[in-house]
Image (cartoon, helix red, strand yellow):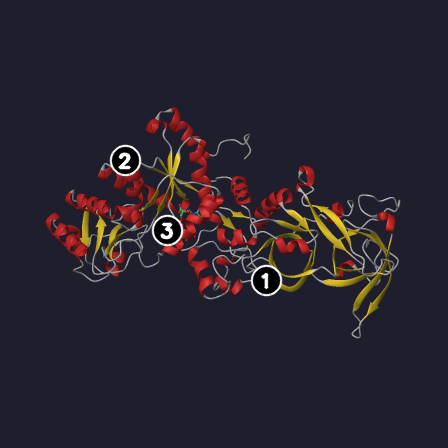
Amino acid sequence: MSEERSLNFLEEIIEDDIRNGKNGGRVLTRFPPEPNGYLHIGHAKSICLNFGIAAKYNGKTNLRFDDTNPTTEDVEYVDSIKKDIQWLGFKWDKELYSSDYFDKLYDFALELIKQGLAYVEDGSAEEIASAKGTPTEPGKPTPSRSRSIEENLQLFREMKEGKYPDGAMVLRAKIDLASPNMHLRDPLMYRIKHAHHHRTGDQWCIYPMYDFAHGQSDSLEEITHSICTLEFVPHRPLYEWFIQKLNNFPSKQYEFARLNMNYTVMSKRKLLQLVNENHVSGWDDPRMPTISGLRRRGYTPLSIRNFSERIGVARRENLIDLSLLEFCIREDLNKSAWRRMAVLEPLKLVISNYPEGQTEVMEGENNPEMEGGDGLRHIPFSSELWIERDDFMEEPSKKYFRLGPGLMVRLKHAYIVRCDSFVKDESGNVSEVHCTYIPESRSGTDTSGIHVKGTIHWVCAKSAQTAEIRLYDRLFRVEDPSNEDGDFKDYINPDSLTVISNAFVEPDLMNAEAGRGYQFIRKGYFSLDSDSRPGKPVFNRTVTLKDTWAKESQKS
Ligand code: ATP
Ligand code: MG
């Protein structure tokens, strides 16, 4: 994190509060996911913000599952959310559930009824909606609004006891039907839902609404700064109304712009559709913007934290370019990934003056960006190699510095070779390239005095191992699929996944470790996929390299 950057608006607010001795200088934030899906990169921003800001001011962060909607929630999601937060590198203070407050929330509701500030509504959803008016027209009271306190208490208790079917009644706050803020026109506090809850089981058949439950949960935990996204700005007066009327701890709500990113979708509802309709292989499909997808793709926690820091905290919505996220992972992997060689589209190269049957062992640093190279690995070399098909051209153009008749290149970590001839198969495709090598040109002890412009990667044919390689492209072919005509799924990129089932990799990659980044020289950054089986590795391309070809060719 850059120490020099100026404070963001939330940090300014917090520093002000600390200076003024508010809450005794205490900072307590919370991250409140609803366990109805896996976390995505937008949540990562909220996590980095909530945990980051608390840590900066010696505060703490609670993890609170906002589990007030029994029909969409599941323990699978709870577990994945915890795993993702920990993986990102954060530690919550308390693990809490809104459902743990159901008793207290119910008592708060009774209290509001007793104050004449809440009533049981038995009109239909349509009746409620039509009596609510429009932003330019005040609402009208429904007959339920004038119910007596006693009757409200009785009906609400009966709602809780399960006397009424779903949708028969709701509890509403009695605020102001003429308010220009529609959220204050007697908003719903409770609804009836005879549904099994993943924690409370069948104990409840009434469930509190977000606006009521969220703020009072904040209050009960004495959250000092309740940070949420901009769509909650119009809810803030309601947030404050409940707290004030109940005389609860004065948590304060602050809003920032949610993260939107191009070429993807970011709502759990839409991500769930992609999973359920098999457009992707699961929540952790490497093309998904979920944290689990990014992890499987090879993203590191540091790259995501850096991304979140870089996009900053704004109070205006914008669309962040996917390439910024890619920049952040490249930046990290360039420093941490181990270099390896893999040939994705193989073409045979035969060295005619290299003794057949002889094998030599070349050495390559695991990571030249690290002091000491982070160790060496051994790379077998012999007279037959695999090279990349597009590293050979039958009729090379002037600026082509790789192989073609008469041209010389360096084989990375090995020798300089000159192309003498090539062979074609019956269909006219080049099937073999024949070269001679310069014995004095071995990397590290090169006395040949020959300077070549190009360096290419290779894999020794005798010891090459087969691997499956999965290349990814954007999941959508338009920048903002949610804002196009028709269904967002119509804009899925049909070429977002390319599978190469028979790539050749250097033998050391049979020991590849999950969670480690590998740079396949000239091909990008890769990581081992969980579909790998013993002897059958599968690699995901995390991200392509920047155009490092010019730089790479200077080195040997
Ligand atoms: P979605 O709309 O994707 O389903 P949500 O807001 O319903 O997300 P929650 O589980 O309620 O998901 O979100 C938990 C927290 O993460 C909330 O505080 C929410 O504001 C924040 N959050 C969700 N999406 C984003 C985003 N795109 N950018 C920043 N914060 C987000
Ligand atoms: Mg939500």
In-image side of 50 versus 193 (left or right) = right
Residue on which disc 1 sits: 497
Residue type highlighted by circle 1: Leu
Q: Earlier in the sequence, mark 2 or mark 3?
A: 3
Q: Which residue is at the front of the view, 208 or 518?
A: 518
Residue 227 tag number: none
How far, Cα to Cα, is label 1 from label 2?
51 Å
Q: Position of residue 176 (x, y in %)?
A: 24, 45
User: Would you call the spot at circle 3 few (<14 residues within 10 Å), some (14-19), or many (20 or more)?
Assistant: many
Do we see residue 347 in this rendering? yes
Q: Badge 2 local density, few (<14 within 10 Å), some, or many (20+)?
A: some
Q: Please name the residue that numbered disc 2 is placed on.
A: 249
- Check mark 1 vs ligand 1: CB closer than 8 Å? yes or no: no
- Label 2, label 3: how many angstroms apart (C-alpha)? 23 Å
Please, what secondary structure does the residue beneath circle 3 have? Answer: loop
Q: What is the secondary structure assignment of the residue under circle 1?
A: strand
Three-letter amino acid code at disc 3? Glu
Q: Callout 2, which amino acid?
A: Phe
Instruction: Tell which circle, 1 or 2, labels the residue nearer the N-terminal end.
Output: 2
Q: What element does badge 2 sit on?
A: loop
Label 3 residue near ligand 1, CB within 8 Å: yes
Residue at point 38%, 28% (across, down)? 17
